[in-house]
Image (cartoon, rainbow, N blue to C red):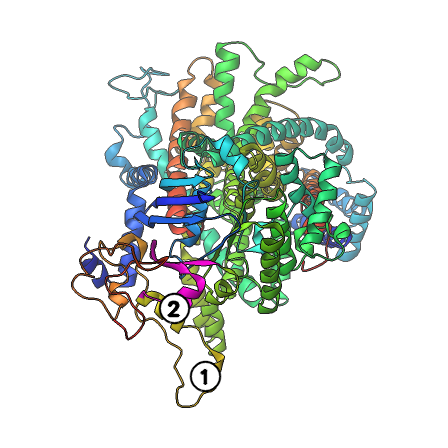
Amino acid sequence: MGGFILRKAGAALIVLFLASVLVFSGIRAIPGDAALALGGEERDPAVTAQIRHKYGLDRPVPIQYLHWVGLAVRGDLGRDSRELSVSHTIVTRIPLTLELAGLSLLIGTLIGAVAGVLAAIRHGRLADYLSNGIALIGLSVPHFWLGLLMIIEFSVNLHWLPSGGYVSFRADPIGNLRHMAMPALVLGTGLSAVVMRQMRSAMLESLGADYVRTARAKGLSEWSVVCKHALRNSLITVTTIIGLQFGALISGAVITETIFGIAGFGRLTIDAVSQRDYALIQGVVLVTAAGYVLVNLAVDVLYSFLNPRIRISGGAA
Amino acid sequence: MSYVEAAALSPASRRRRLLRRRFLRRPMAVAGLAVVLAFVATAIFAPLIAPYSPSATDFYAVLGHPSGKHLLGTDELGRDIFSRIVYGSRASMLAGFLATVLAMTIAVPIGLAAGYYRGWIDPVISRITDVLLAFPFLILAVGLAAILGPSLLNATLALGIGAVPGLIRIARGEALSLREEDYVRAAIANGGSDLTILGRHILPNMLSTLLVQATVTIPVAIVGEAVLSFLGLGVQPPTPSWGVMLEGAQSYLTQAPRLAVYPGLAIVLAALAFNLLGDGLRDILDPKTQR
Amino acid sequence: MPPLLEVSELSVRFDTDEGRVYAVDGMEFSLGEGEVLGIVGESGCGKSVTVMSMLGLLPPTATVSGRVLFQGEDLLQVRPARLRRVRGKEISFVFQEPMTSLNPVFTVGVQIGEVLRKHLGASRSAARKRTIDLLELVRIPAPSRRVDEYPHQLSGGMRQRVMIAMALACDPKVLVADEPTTALDVTIQAGILDLMRDVRERLGTAIVLITHNLGVVADLADRVIVMYAGRKAEEAPVRELFARPQHPYTIGLLGAIPRPGEVLQGERRRRLQEIPGRVPSLSELPDHCAFADRCPRADERTRSEIPPLREVRADHLVACFHPGEDGTS
């Protein structure tokens, strides 16, 4: 297992390195002078030169990169166009998005996994068609539209939930959950559809496997056959899928936070792009890539734990 | 079909016949195909179908309820919502098909090369794919739209590029496993050129997988176009697009919630139709699901 | 004394996308205590489906009819809970693919212990102790270490021994072995067959042995059934069948076995025979003798009626209008 994790960690480092190069050069690939871009509306040559010097743009590009990475590793992502620390801005925005993503992940995997298992054991019957149909609709409904519909129903018509905004959990736990309910549901719905379909096909495959026939021939109850023998194997495949959903989750968070006026990391991304605040864009994208790499590394660790063929290598493996 | 009749057919046409029979036995897939064709026809013949011009304003009927005159009512400028949805299908279909074609054109050759040649090229391409997957497609699209400027074409470009890494993975995996098939090994052993082997043995056998992937990429792009237009990064108003209409509807959620309902329904219906079709195709083409 | 297991009029039908497929049609056989019954036939002739259908192990697309009397109880009529108490305890299975028949995510000990805990209510520690004994019984070296290993750490032959240990865990009355050696190397096969013979002699377990290999049957079985296209073609005690095969299909099968002694004898050299034609697809089973198209003895009657089973010699049943050893009919 150690070797597997080390290999994955190595690959993660490479991805992170390439991503940082991409982010770094992406900013420099923007048409026009990066110093002008970083300087915003300022066009005074003296100021531009000053910016050029301050960002080290008068030095060779590899040195600039190393300098930038060196600072980034120490948690310094530079200053945005309003001279605010990018790292600080990101750190204050991330908890909101983490809460949103965590709640949606919970909703999505719970609903998705249960529905997927049910659909697989009722394969070809009403429950299967029904959950499959609902999942397909779930995949086809855009987040932002679902968000609008929920606002119309639960905020405008029924006045049950606030249509937007955020209060911290520590200040007002109930209020926090009331604000988070709709966004988390919106984001969780799309995820549950994906998880459901993956779980269904993984379970169908497991249920058709020879070892499940063996389990049945042993006289085990249907519950043991499904929830022990088939599910344990299906979980191995489904965990890897959840890692790949990170990107979709962030994309979804961008939209959801926009609709519900939550000042989280997703909203920050849109703002950074629409204000063309390049230092901020750089920081946000780098953090996203690092998040993706970390999540997938965690998934790999979980995967190797669930899969004894990797946890214990030996024999004919 | 009698036994003798079946035997008289060539294997290829027998297979086609079988696939058609399997497809027709899936009512949801057939319904999906019908709705897809209807949307494509709507996009092409929009001027013939829409009762009004999408930009014709009727100030006597601002935010009007559905009526005989305006099937789905009117918006804040008194424009006919039904006509705008009809014209809006053009942006959706264009973005859906073009982005998918673009993504396929880029991804398939790269995936083929990685899966077929392996060697140093495969890890390099796989690593790059991993890196691209690390950037959520929406951030990629938003970034591209910000750099290139907002327009339908740029949004489509961004959506197409966003779909590339995932498709590379699929094409690579497919090429990798096909390369191990006996008939491909035999062709290699017989000294067939790479181009012949890729073109005659590997690509044709990937087609059904690619067709299914294309069918499920289109709805992603359709929804993506709506998202980007909604965020102001795609189609620019007053040109009608479902995303643009929803953006406009946001200000009237209390007065006229139906403004937010109809364009959304159009998106769901179109995406659902493609997804149903894709699922049906997957069922009939993928031998793994024929238990 | 009534037989332990008595199967009659067993038919299995599958409903697929391409229409109905008949896998087994009117199968019947019986099995006495401690008896070894061989069922032989080409792949796809319905031999596996026959035994799987007895314990309801087929997918839901299968429709099974007929009677499967086990100690006087019809297994096709009992409730699922009762069926689960028979499976693995009274009648247990060894499958063809040792590589995929064990669950990759559980240790050998967990998978064998599961049977003991379920059927005998054994405690965790008792199950473990008995599992080690069972591994020893099937001659797995270092059983107290192997018990904690995962299937991927074992070779194919070892895995099949684990399957056999699992099948024997509750001292079943009947052991169904579905091609137990087919997936293994020849050298490993002999060890597994030895083990099966041992099981029968030491534990007195009745065995249904399914195989396409007549050599294995000759080695182990008391009685043999030859199946063709979902129906029984011939049934006889093993010596009788090998000495006086009556059905042209059986004769063909025997002819397809190389006999080393004869190959060397110069003038009487016999070519290894193959049976001409192909097995009919089960969706197009004819209402006449299914072997007719491949049979040298076929005539008008063979092509218009299904031949019933007849007892042509003592304990020797044949479904053929023109039975007899080669050259005698």
Chain letter for the residue marked with disc 1 in the picture: C
Label 1 belongs to which residue? C263
Q: Is residue B185 left or right of residue B7?
A: right
Figure check: A202 above or below B115: above
Element under label 1? helix
Q: Which mark is residue C253?
A: 2
Tell me the quadrant of the picture where the N terminus of chain C can be found: top left
Say few, some or many: other residues with alpha carbon within 10 Å of mark 2 (under 14 / 14 to 19 / 20 or more): many
Figure check: B277 above or below C250: above
Q: How much space separates mark 2 and mark 1, taking CA atoms?
A: 17 Å
Figure check: A74 above or below B76: below
x then y, percent, for residue A258:
58, 27
Marks 2 and 1, the one that precedes in the sequence: 2
x then y, percent, for residue B157:
49, 47
Element under label 2? helix
Task: Check the image and name the residue furthest to the bottom.
Answer: C266
Q: Is residue C190 left or right of residue B71?
A: right
| Callout 1 amino acid | Val
Q: Is residue C203 left or right of residue A50?
A: left
- Is disc 1 on the same chain as disc 2? yes
Chain part drawn in magenta: C222-247
Front residue of B211/C84: it is C84
Front residue of A176/C200: it is C200
Q: Which mark is residue C150?
A: none
Say few, some or many: other residues with alpha carbon within 10 Å of mark 1 (under 14 / 14 to 19 / 20 or more): some
Chain letter for the residue marked with disc 2 in the picture: C
